Image (cartoon, rainbow, N blue to C red):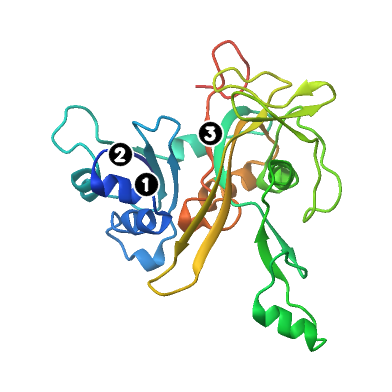
Amino acid sequence: MTYLSRIRINPLRTAGRRLLGSPRRLHGAVMGGLADDPEQQRPLWRLDSDNPHRPKLLVLSESKPDWTHIVEQAGWPHADGEHYELREYEPLLGRLAVGQEFTFRVTANPVQNTNEPEHPTERQRQRAREGQRRRSQRVGHRTAGAQLGWFLARTEKWGFVVPGAPPTTGTSEHPTVAEPVSTREGVSFEADGAACSGEAGEIEPARNVRIAARDRHSFPKRRGSRPVVLHTATFEGRLRVTSVELLRRALLRGIGPAKAYGCGLLTLGTLPDGESGAGD
């Protein structure tokens, strides 16, 4: 059985601020809520901080978790209300059908493999001086256009398409899209005269994807180690199912790299009232 959890984090508590500021600590807190052998599980999680006063941690786990430790250390343990929500995930998976449309949200780590990194290490420079073949290195996409291109170039292998999205060109490693335009809501993209962006709850046919947030994280994987650097982008919008099997796999296994550090959890929602798509 798979479960989707949503936990409230208190940003005013010291422990809450530490969790919010460190993907490594959040990963540890997530693993601490699983009673089964954590080495046998690969939970997905995402931090949604749209409201900085009420950030929420979403976790998809293969077994039923207990988030009491997060509530007691970094939540509101003595306040009224539901401190965390826990729902079975199978009902959503069972409703998927080709042609259905949903709203979606995912934080991902868009990357590319390259033999010519912009900032080579000393070892890479030495290999180049010696005439040795450079090893392929995974580097993060840093611009909004490249990040959106990375996402749109891969949607069909994840079992969906974004209706009305700008077409990608080039290879899957180096896709290109329309140039980004700064907006008050975030980053939008012009395609065929229509902006491919949209405010939450107001997603129109020609405004079906946007980058809601872009971040750079740097933290040590362990004490004394070199820092892990992640460039992340949070995509949200509207999708249409093209393959139930592929979308189910993407929902359960996540998309892209850096899943241990809050990337890859794709969540779906129903369309606004009055629009056709996913049924209730």
Provide the residue designation for mark 3: 268
Mark number displayed over residue 11: 2
Report which quarter residue 182 is drawn in.
top right
Quick check: marks 2 and 3 in contact, CB under 8 Å?
no
Q: Is residue 197 above or below residue 126?
A: above
Give the foreground label among 2 and 3: 2
Q: CA distance from mark 2 to mark 3?
A: 26 Å
**Is mark 2 in CB contact (under 8 Å) with mark 1?**
yes
Label 2 neighbourhood size at 10 Å, few (<14), some (14-19), many (20+)? some
Q: CA distance from mark 1 to mark 3?
A: 23 Å
Q: Viewed as shown, does residue 145 lie left or right of 91?
A: right
Identify residue for label 1. 20
- Image location (x, y in percent) of residue 80: 17, 27
| Residue located 76% across and 78% down the image | 134
The answer to which of 105 and 180 lies nearer the viewer is 180
- Measured as percent of width and height from the top left, residue 147 is found at 68, 45
- What element does badge 1 sit on? helix
Residue 169, x across and y down, in percent: 86, 45
On screen, residue 240 versus residue 179, left or right, reads left
Q: Are marks 1 and 3 in contact (CB under 8 Å)?
A: no
Residue 67 visible in the displayed image: no
Q: Which amino acid lies under the numbered mark 3 shown in the image of this protein?
A: Leu
